[in-house]
């Protein structure tokens, strides 16, 4: 059972929202599956629908059980199976942290410090993430809740200042190259939402109405991404297809009152999003490693995870081709289906067969 104090559902879903939003606003042109124009907006809506559907096994699972997570449920069938599942989760979240670190490294190297070495700056972000992960889920949740409002305000300001720059001619006819590329791109976008796997592990720690919070989370992500994509397409048009970090180009064009450019503000926001995503992932890795080895090591697992993430992501961020390789659509989609869909279905079958009384939390 996942020990620790409960976290408010609003704080929990704020963390999930910020974590997913980081992936969205740092998307790279080569990962869009060849779609553009209006199809990108349609894909954003379809992605939210696919995300909602793919998370249903998790919520069917926790309709039957409360107070235990997916590893506890699997351990009813076999303790060895639960250890294997924990190891798979470790590999998944190590990949997630490395991908996020490399994504941040690429962004920092191209946008923030294009002519300087970013190693020290990135190391500082990781050091802060280690400290935040060590402090635990509750302080991290409170921080995420505050940042949720700050980030939302910054992105809303970005959208509002760019509405007047939207050109309707930039919107192409729907399904310009047929529906297949849109569906493929939407599934890849949904599959990049590994935050669904966090639900399997941490949902028992969430107080309040977790299911209602999930609906708000999916709706919020879908609305935010759709709004951003609409502005992206309407303002940049085909020019957005040649930019590595298209949303930063939007920030450069945005103006508000005496501020001629909002790119510095948006860059700060994206740094905070990277900090949240990395620290949240390090916290989960610490829990999973403790579960796997049945031991708690103060700081050790978090530092080891951060060190591995920093070293690997720093190497990958220097090579765009290598980053594109680890972000391969088929690879990401297989991981998502196995860990976010198949594993919860397996746990659901175990739960149905074993019955609620068989679970560790319900034993006398």
Image (spheres, helix red, strand yellow):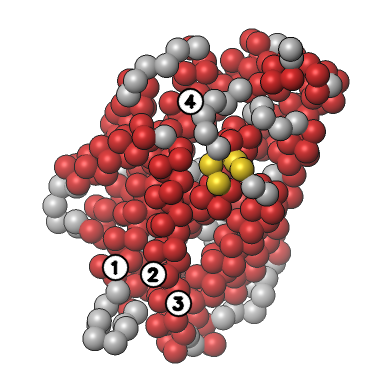
2 or 3: mark nearer the eye: 2
Residue 335, image x, y percentages: 59, 35
Report the Cα–Cα distance between label 1 and label 4.
Answer: 34 Å
Q: Can the viewer see residue 14 in this picture?
A: yes
In the rendered image, which residue does mark 4 sit on? 287
Task: Find disc 1 in the rendering and name its residue.
Answer: 265
Quarter of the image where one finds residue 85: top right
Evaluate if marks 1 and 4 touch, with contact meaning CB atoms under 8 Å apart: no
Relative placement, left or right, of 348 versus 17 is: right
Instruction: Check disc 2 and report its element: helix, strand or loop.
Output: helix
Q: Earlier in the sequence, mark 1 or mark 2?
A: 2
Residue 22 seen from this side: no
Distance from Cα at disc 3 to Cα at disc 4: 38 Å
Quadrant of the drawing holding the N terminus: top right
43 left or right, relative to 323: right
Residue labelled with disc 3:
159
The answer to which quarter of the image holds residue 35 is bottom right
Q: Residue at x 47, y 20 (%)?
A: 289
Looking at the image, do the residues carrying marks 2 and 3 touch, with CB atoms under 8 Å apart?
no
Q: Residue furthest left?
A: 116
In the displayed structure image, the side of residue 60 where residue 69 appears, left or right: left
Mark nearer the N terminus (2 vs 4): 2
Q: Position of residue 8 (x, y in %)?
A: 55, 46
| Residue 259 placement (x, y as % from top left) | 25, 81
Q: CA distance from mark 2 to mark 3?
A: 9 Å
User: Residue 82 bears which disc, if any?
Assistant: none
Of label 1 and label 4, which has the lower sequence position? 1
Out of 278 and 235, give the one closest to the viewer: 278
Q: Are marks 1 and 2 in contact (CB under 8 Å)?
A: yes
Dots 2 and 4: beta carbons under 8 Å?
no
């Amino acid at each position: 059972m996942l020990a620790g104090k409960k976290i408010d559902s609003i704080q929990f879903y704020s963390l999930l929202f910020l974590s997913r939003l980081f992936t969205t606003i740092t998307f790279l042109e080569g990962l869009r599956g060849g779609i553009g124009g209006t199809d990108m907006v349609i894909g954003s809506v379809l992605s939210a629908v696919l995300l909602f559907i793919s998370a249903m096994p998790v919520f069917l699972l926790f309709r039957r059980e409360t107070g235990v997570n997916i590893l506890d449920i699997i351990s009813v069938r076999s303790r060895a199976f639960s250890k294997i599942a924990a190891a798979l989760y470790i590999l998944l979240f190590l990949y997630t942290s490395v991908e996020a670190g490399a994504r941040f490294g690429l962004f920092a190297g191209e946008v923030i410090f294009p002519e300087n070495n970013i190693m020290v700056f990135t190391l500082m972000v990781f050091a802060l993430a280690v400290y935040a992960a060590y402090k635990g889920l509750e302080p991290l949740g409170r921080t995420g809740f505050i940042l949720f409002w700050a980030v939302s305000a910054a992105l809303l300001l970005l959208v509002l200042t760019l509405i007047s720059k939207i050109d309707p001619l930039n919107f192409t006819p729907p399904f310009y190259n047929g529906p297949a590329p849109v569906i493929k791109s939407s599934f890849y976008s949904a599959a990049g939402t590994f935050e669904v796997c966090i639900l399997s592990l941490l949902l028992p720690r969430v107080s309040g109405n977790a299911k209602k919070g999930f609906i708000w989370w999916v709706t919020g992500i879908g609305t935010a991404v759709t709004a951003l994509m609409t502005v992206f397409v309407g303002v940049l048009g085909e020019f957005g297809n040649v930019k590595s970090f298209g949303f930063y180009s939007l920030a450069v064009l945005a103006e508000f009152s005496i501020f001629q450019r909002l790119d510095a503000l948006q860059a700060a926001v994206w740094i905070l999003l990277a900090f949240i995503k990395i620290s949240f992932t390090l916290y989960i890795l610490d829990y999973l490693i403790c579960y796997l080895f049945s031991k708690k090591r103060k700081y050790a697992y978090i530092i080891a995870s951060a060190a591995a993430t920093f070293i690997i992501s720093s190497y990958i961020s220097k090579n765009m081709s290598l980053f594109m390789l680890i972000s391969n659509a088929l690879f990401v989609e297989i991981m998502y289906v196995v860990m976010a869909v198949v594993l919860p279905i397996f746990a659901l079958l175990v739960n149905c067969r074993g019955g609620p009384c068989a679970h560790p939390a319900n034993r006398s």
